[in-house]
Amino acid sequence: AQSVTQLDSHVSVSEGTPVLLRCNYSSSYSPSLFWYVQHPNKGLQLLLKYTSAATLVKGINGFEAEFKKSETSFHLTKPSAHMSDAAEYFCVVSDNQAGTALIFGKGTTLSVSS
Amino acid sequence: GAGVSQSPRYKVAKRGQDVALRCDPISGHVSLFWYQQALGQGPEFLTYFQNEAQLDKSGLPSDRFFAERPEGSVSTLKIQRTQQEDSAVYLCASSPLAGGGNTGELFFGEGSRLTVL
């Protein structure tokens, strides 16, 4: 069975500093991995996805993530945080089996201070 | 807009009441998912439809939960005899692709927040 573990429930950064949100996954198959963002009172939005192509994936709003099979990790990074990045971030795994849903981590709350 | 629409956005029910939550997916989307998101937690899978067929209902927590998508478009999640532990945000998501986990990007609605007193 597949699962994801988000290693930090809350991350605080200053505006303009780098962001690192950590995620480890477990999957019996070759997984697809995603990061979704949830702003308050808004629907979940896809940031980026890895589907066995390039291991370094670029997403929207300057975010990127690197798939490391040896470490079973898919950490999310951004070089410089903006105030608008403050939100809840979810790491998500799918094992690519037909009929299988996406499995979400518990989420990391990102706070950005000025 | 043409996004996923859910109604009602907020629902307060007394324990024991039945509730129905509606999801209007993006037109033409084949796949439809329901998720339950408890406070401070990530969404948890409830059920999956491909068109009108309910292919996976393994996440439904009890037989009080029932979902349908009779014409392969609008879906309704029904909870009978609500309990306090049913309080959560219920999220609907759709995708133009079939195949469950192979659908890649899911388009989520804003959710229906259910509070059971």
Image (cartoon, rainbow, N blue to C red):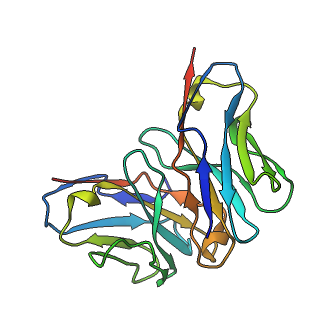
Is residue A56 found left or right of B103 in the rendered image? right
Tell me the residue at 14%/66% (across/down): B17
Question: From this viewpoint, which residue is outermost toward the front?
Answer: A71
Give A102 or A40, whichever is nearer the viewer: A102
Decide if residue A96 is on the left or right side of residue B108.
right
Is residue B93 or residue B96 the one in the foreground?
B93
> Residue lying farthest top?
A114
| Circle count | 0
Q: Quadrant of residue B68?
A: bottom left
Task: Provide residue B81's location: percent of width, then percent of height.
Answer: 17, 70
Q: On screen, A67 above or below A87?
A: below
Residue B105 at least partly seen: no
Classify residue B93 as left or right of residue A63.
Answer: left
Q: Position of residue B19 (x, y in %)?
A: 22, 66
Viewer can see residue A88: yes
Q: Position of residue B48 (x, y in %)?
A: 49, 75
Location of residue A41 (image quadrant):
top left
Q: Which residue is rendered at x = 57% and y = 62% of the image?
A: A103
Q: Is residue A85 above or below residue B78?
A: above
Which residue is rendered at x = 57% and y = 14% of the image?
A114
Left or right: residue B67 versus residue A63 is: left
**Residue in view at x 60 percent, y 51 percent:** A5
